[in-house]
Image (cartoon, helix red, strand yellow):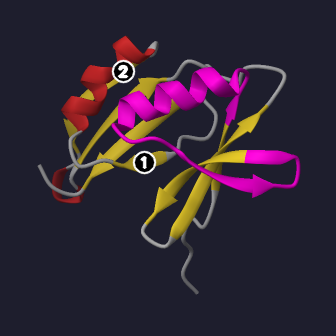
Amino acid sequence: MSVSVNWFEIPVVDKARAVEFYGQVLGAPLGTMDGPDGPMYVFMGEEGPVGALSETDSAPAAGGVVVYLSCDDIEAALGRTAQAGGSIAQEKTSIGPFGFIGRFNDTEGNIVALHTPTD
């Protein structure tokens, strides 16, 4: 039996601020789709949405789940993080044959990671 991630949600306190932040950092706007409670802002994969922003009343706990988002240019994305209102938690770092990662703190208190399999 194999396991893969088929959906993720990033908790946010201020949805509009988070939509702006992720659009700037990833260099592409989030998609939208109808959800059970109104419009959802989603991260688009090749075959459709793969995750969404999820509105919450409180900031997430430190050290919780870390989501890795695919990113072709980690250095560029991390470079846009401060301008978008976040901060870099980990500069681009080699993980050997698995590629490279970097982490940032978003505007909502989450630590989110970026991954690329190649330099």
- The number of numbered badges drawn on the structure is 2
Which residue occupies the extreme left position in the image? 119
Residue placed most toward the observer, 23 or 1: 23
Q: Position of residue 4 (x, y in %)?
A: 54, 71
Residue placed most toward the observer, 52 or 41: 41
Q: What is the crowding at mark 2: few (fewer than 14 residues within 10 Å), some, or many (at least 20)? A: many
Reading the image, the residue beneath label 1 is: 69
Reading the image, the residue beneath label 2 is: 81
The type of residue carrying mark 1 is Leu
Left or right: residue 106 versus residue 104 is right
Q: Is residue 19 magenta?
A: yes
Helix, strand or loop status at disc 2 = helix
Which image quarter is the N terminus in? bottom right
The type of residue carrying mark 2 is Thr
First of labels 2, 1 by sequence position: 1
Residue 22 circle label: none
Q: Position of residue 76 (x, y in %)?
A: 21, 31
Which residue occupies the extreme right position in the image? 37
Q: Position of residue 119 (x, y in %)?
A: 11, 49
Helix, strand or loop status at disc 1 = strand
Tell me where the magenta segment starts and ends, as one range.
Answer: 11-39
- Residue at (64, 25) in percent of width and height: 16
Marks 2 and 1 sit apart, C-alpha to C-alpha, by 14 Å
30 is higher (above) or lower (below) than 8: above
52 is higher (above) or lower (below) than 26: below
